[in-house]
Image: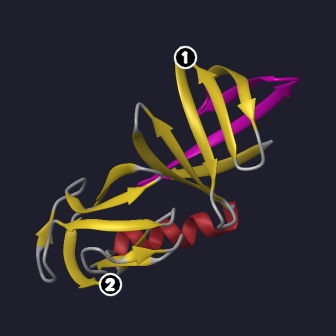
Amino acid sequence: MKFQARIKDEIMSVEVRRDGDHFDVLIDGESHPVALIFSDASHDVLLMDNNSFDVILLDQENHYQVNVLNRFFDVEIIDPRKKALYASAMDEGGRKAIRTQMPGRIIKILVEQGAEVAEGQGLLILEAMKMQNEIKAPRAGVVVSLAVRENDSVEGNALLAELE
């Protein structure tokens, strides 16, 4: 199976070849053997390059959350037809919605509306699955809106903020 995946604003080519519980995953042409350790309806544990990855299936189609050493990464499977549209929007610096991938509670807001932020700068702290996760800016920009307040409960895919 061949597809493209987005982590933050980076798009990668991925090819997966399966043999039982073992996979050969090519990421941008580089081979990585992967073993499936555990799987249930919404959660998989993978072993890749001597690292354990928790993969949590979200309620939203084509979105996954990957936990590596208690750091969460949002991964989106990209429809190749949408790749050009996505790349164009990011190049233009258009408005970027920042959404939560999991239900949780807003613990702390780290920025104010109108603030300039750098790529990777913390925007807020979300408590989900009994862990506090810092939601970071996927790119540099200006916070044009904050859609949540401290102590708000949010559902999966809820709008948190928008950057421009």
Query: Which amino acid, by three-letter code, is at mark 1?
Result: Asp
The image quadrant where one finds the N terminus is top right
Q: Is residue 84 above or below residue 152?
A: above
On screen, residue 118 versus residue 63, left or right, reads left
Q: Nearer the viewer, residue 144 or 111?
A: 111
The image quadrant where one finds the C terminus is bottom left
Does dot 1 land on a helix, a strand or a loop? loop
Dominant secondary structure of the magenta stretch?
strand
Q: Is residue 96 above or below residue 34?
A: below
Cα separation, mark 2 vs mark 1, equals 39 Å
Front: mark 2 or 1: 2
On screen, residue 54 versus residue 93, left or right, reads right
User: Residue 19 got which mark?
Assistant: none
Does dot 2 land on a helix, a strand or a loop? loop
The residue wearing badge 2 is: 147
- Residue 146 percent location from the top left of the image: 26, 82
91 within the magenta span: no
The quarter of the picture where residue 135 lies is bottom left
- Residue 7 percent location from the top left of the image: 47, 50
Q: How many marks?
A: 2
Query: Which residue range is magenta in the image?
Result: 7-30
Residue 97 in view in this figure: no
Q: If you read the primary sequence from the N terminus, does the residue marked by circle 2 or circle 1 appear first?
A: 1
User: Residue 49 got which mark?
Assistant: 1
Query: What residue is at 41 percent from the left and 75 percent from the top?
Result: 153
